[in-house]
Amino acid sequence: MVIILPMITKNFLTFDIEEWFHANYDGIDPSQYDFRSTNLEANVDRLLAICDAFNVKSTCFILGDVARHKPYIIKKLFDAGHEIASHGSSHRLIYPMKPDEFHADIQSSSDILEQIIGEKVVGFRAPSWSVRPDTLPWFYDILAHEGFLYSSSVYPAKNTLFGIPNFPDTPHYPSPLNILEIPQSVMNLFGNRVGYAGGGYLRFFPTWLIKRMMREKNREEKSVFIYLHPREIDIHQPRLKLGLMNGYFHYQGIDGCEKKLSSLLEEFSSSFCRMDAYAKQVAAGKILL
Ligand SMILES: [Zn+2]
């Protein structure tokens, strides 16, 4: 008898939990800024309230340095049922690092997160989607060595700052090491792939378009993930000194972002699951890719 497993399409709500100054632009050094007296906890509380309102559990990729300075925020997210995953230690880009530097960076981040929550961390997101084709072989190797189950680190397109064009745009195993990659969701715009469901893309594109794309992808049985940072709902945050283009991309659309997120959750709330639950079901053969 042939058993046909159902294709279950799930969407993901993810947050990269970091401060307003964690950005990888030339001339910006996050170590120069102060973790004290920021709006991070208040912003996280607002995101938690939105999740509660629509009964959605998110995956939170948390910076080790945030966990070290503000462990109570991680505990609060964990106690509310959200997944605690790793965003590395100090928001360093992956590709300039040597493999052993990256290894030490994620070990340090996992150590502090696991100390706070008392559970193994199984998910990783690269700061600023900073994996490149030349880093991929050792990147997944080191994640596997550290017991991670999945990564959500690749933008399968190209912009001025990051991305790997021609990378598969759906969850898959990119190496034989059993690390599931859940790449950023992209749409086809005039023949080019472009993000639409997170960060500056989510803030830029209108809600109706994002919803239309999500419906379309889900009809094709493709997962979509939303990603946001706490600063992206905060109109009162201090501003980094960025050039015209980077400054626009970094700050446009912040005033309407919270409402946009609520509207997306209102329509799609029942389809969301945590990435760790999804990766475990894929590994167990309960979800077919
Ligand atoms: Zn980040």
Image: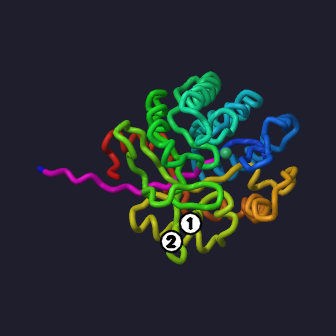
Does the residue at mark 2 contact the one at mark 1 (Cβ under 8 Å)?
Answer: yes
Please name the amino acid that badge 1 sits on: Val
**Quick check: which quadrant has ligand 1?**
top right
Residue 34, by quadrant, is top right
Q: Helix or strand or loop: what does disc 2 sit on?
A: strand
Residue 194 image label = 1
Q: Residues within 10 Å of mark 1 (few under 14, many from 20)?
A: some
**Stretch in magenta:** 2-15
Q: At which x and y percent is residue 229?
A: 70, 50
Q: CA distance from mark 2 to mark 1?
A: 6 Å
In the picture shown, does residue 31 fall above or below 134? Answer: above
Q: Residues within 10 Å of mark 2 (few under 14, many from 20)?
A: few
Residue 188 image label = 2
Secondary structure, magenta segment, majority class: loop
Numbered disc total: 2
Decide if residue 272 is on the left or right side of residue 170.
right
